[in-house]
Image (cartoon, grey):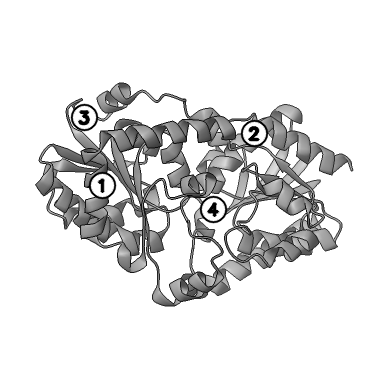
Amino acid sequence: MKVAMVAGETSGDLLGGALLKALQSRWPGLQAQGIGGERMMAQGFDAWWPSDKLAVRGYVEVLRHYREIVGIRNQLRDRLIASPPDVFIGIDAPDFNIDLEGALRERGIKTVHFVCPSIWAWRAERVHKIKRCCDHVLCLFPFEPELLHKHGIGATYVGHPLASTIPMEPDKAAARAALELSEDDDVVAILPGSRGSEVKYLAGRFFAAAAVVKKQRPKARFIVPAVPHLKAKISAAADSAGLGDALRVLDGQSHTALAACDVTLLASGTATLEAALFKRPMVVAYAMNWLTWTIHQRQHLQPWVALPNILEREFIVPELLQHDANPERLAGEVLDWFARPDRMAAVQEKFRAQHELLRRDTAKLATDAIEEVVNR
């Protein structure tokens, strides 16, 4: 069995690592190559390019890297056409993967897209390209297959793998002990994103907000799990906040940080779902280049951007976007969680219900669907 895969960033690498383990159990001796990260490579994946090459978000930001990204896609396409895999699996990164899937499908290579593009949120017209390019779509959320089926696209709900790996009741005490935090500390986990553009637009605001929180709550402690390639940039922004020992930048350890914290301040994205699965109240923020923001707003189809709010279809956690993501407002929302334990308890119950909804044997369900595509 020969599989080609592309995972475009940290969250895709996480999904890819779990999927590869299941695929190898189903097909011993499986060969897998393409674009991936550390978790996929730990499963024996042959990464021709690292996944962080594709970790770019926003129209303006993509333009700066356009030639390199298109060059990688063209080289990968030609290499896979010359030596076809049994199936190509594109993991998220739809702007990169779906066009690639279309080119491969035209040459008779079967294609699976893992993670339904958020056509229910914005750019609904992409459904036509998905139909043309993908043999099957693996969906993380239960409402997605019906939407795709209406357009004649094969799709399977597989749940979210994080819901099976994150415990229903995380051990806060153990996580705090591992990070040398006191049980009496007010702990805020700060996650400014896994892309350079996110750190550029959010890190300074987040750390300025932390300084405001610290003035109101002297016992506050701030932990910042940083992806390795961005740690230096995050540390530089953290140093300028003047928080001293109250703020610590970690080498990764995002799950330990989320388990240890009381509240998290984080960038919109997969991390918001992780925080919900850890039952941690959160303040969600996002900011980007002004032109990217203007284009994005014109294509947005619903009022929410954070995954817990999308699943609940209401604002159960605050979202502060673009100009609203200023230090004073961010700090105010963080402090409000600490001031209202009843609100904390209520949102944690909603997070438990979401956890139950998403907890499936994702790797097996995905592998079953992929096997059907291969054997079709």
Compared with 165, 46 (above or below) is below
Q: Which residue is mark 2?
A: 362
Disc 2 to disc 3: CB gap under 8 Å:
no
Would residue 302 be found to the left or right of residue 278 on screen? Answer: right
Residue 264 image point, x, y percent: 32, 43
Q: Tell me the residue at 54%/53% (across/down).
A: 51
Compared with 153, 65 (above or below) is below
Residue 20 image point, x, y percent: 65, 36
**Amino acid residing under circle 2:** Thr
Measured in 3D between alpha carbons, the distance from the residue under mark 4 to the one under mark 1, in whole angstroms, is 33 Å
Name the mark nearer the viewer: 1 or 2.
1
Q: Which residue is mark 4?
A: 51
* Nearest to N terminus: mark 1 or mark 3: 3
Mark 4: few/some/many CA within 10 Å (<14, 14-19, 20+): many
Measured in 3D between alpha carbons, the distance from the residue under mark 4 to the one under mark 2, in whole angstroms, is 22 Å
User: Element type at marker 4?
Assistant: helix
Measured in 3D between alpha carbons, the distance from the residue under mark 3 to the one under mark 4, in whole angstroms, is 33 Å
Q: Tell me the residue at 85%/61% (across/down).
A: 107
User: Element type at marker 1?
Assistant: helix
